[in-house]
């Protein structure tokens, strides 16, 4: 199983990080180790050596068949479900790595950094680019997103990634986060929603 993730895929979040609205020329792709996956509502243990850890709420897409160099017009055939996930990020370390021109894996791919919710069949939605999602922490909504605001749409991402990697059944695609990221703390209770369906529910320890 491979975990792909997209950086800078919502202009509003790019403004948070860079102070300006912009679209990268091509999708910003990074990967997470399989040990990053946090599922079945298990708690997230905040690492004490990585500084400030922030949540990034995202729609995650599940790949359902083998594919390589997939044409964009056929990309919709290669996923069968979505959910909400959290791309946990060591923000201070990320800023340091970016300043030095280094890869993001240390700040993005550490153990437990890819929380994943329960899957919802894609058949429940008319259009994958017309889905609203949000994250609540301790009963308060802290981040909201709409897939229609993605700079690179899901089918574009799958076509692009499959030029470089063979996609396999069970691979995951974290599609990027909108504005509203923030830090997590011990005893926080996180709940993620796809539309009005709660799919993610876990605690920070």
Image (cartoon, rainbow, N blue to C red):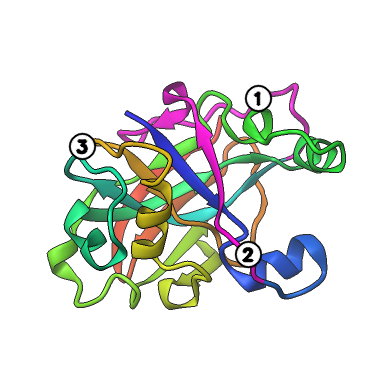
- Above or below, comparing residue 51 to residue 142 in the picture: above
From the viewer's perspective, tell me whether residue 123 is left or right of residue 155.
left
| SS type, badge 3 | loop
- N-terminal of the pair, mark 1 or mark 2, is 2
Residue at 69% over, 34% down: 103
Indicate which disc residue 169 carries: 3
User: Does residue 93 appear to the left or right of 66 in the view shown?
Assistant: right
The residue under the point 79% across, 42% down is 98
User: Above or below — where is 119 with respect to 180?
Assistant: above
Q: Is residue 50 magenta?
A: yes
Q: Position of residue 56 (x, y in %)?
A: 57, 52
Indicate which label's residue lies in the foreground, 3 or 2: 2
Give the labeled residue for mark 1: 47
In the picture provided, is 96 more to the left or to the right than 159? right
Counting residues from the N terminus, which is met first, the one under dot 3 or under dot 2?
2
Most frequent secondary structure within the magenta stretch: loop
Q: Nearer the viewer, residue 144 or 21?
A: 21
Q: Residues within 10 Å of mark 3 (few under 14, many from 20)?
A: some
- What residue span does the magenta drawing correspond to? 23-52
Quadrant of the rendering where the C terminus is positioned: top right
Residue for point 42% across, 68% down: 153
Residue corresponding to mark 2: 25
* In the image: residue 14, left or right of residue 128: right
Secondary structure found at label 2: loop
């Amino acid at each position: 199983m491979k975990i792909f993730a997209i950086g800078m895929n919502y202009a509003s979040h790019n403004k948070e990080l860079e102070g300006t609205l912009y679209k990268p020329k091509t999708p910003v792709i990074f990967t997470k180790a399989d040990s990053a996956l946090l599922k079945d509502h298990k708690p997230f243990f905040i690492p004490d050596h990585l500084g400030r850890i922030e949540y990034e709420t995202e729609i995650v897409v599940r790949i359902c068949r083998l594919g390589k160099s997939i044409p964009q017009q056929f990309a919709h055939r290669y996923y069968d479900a979505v959910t909400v996930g959290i791309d946990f990020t060591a923000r201070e370390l990320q800023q340091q790595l970016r300043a030095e021109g280094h890869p993001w894996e240390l700040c993005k791919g550490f153990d437990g950094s890819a929380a994943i919710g329960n899957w919802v069949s894609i058949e429940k939605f008319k259009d994958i680019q017309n889905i609203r999602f949000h994250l609540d922490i301790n009963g308060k909504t802290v981040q909201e997103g709409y897939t229609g605001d993605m700079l690179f749409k899901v089918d574009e991402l799958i076509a692009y990634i499959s030029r470089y990697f063979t996609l396999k059944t069970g691979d995951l695609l974290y599609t990027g986060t909108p504005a509203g990221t923030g830090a997590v703390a011990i005893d926080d209770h996180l709940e993620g929603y796809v539309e009005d369906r709660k799919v993610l529910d876990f605690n920070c320890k």
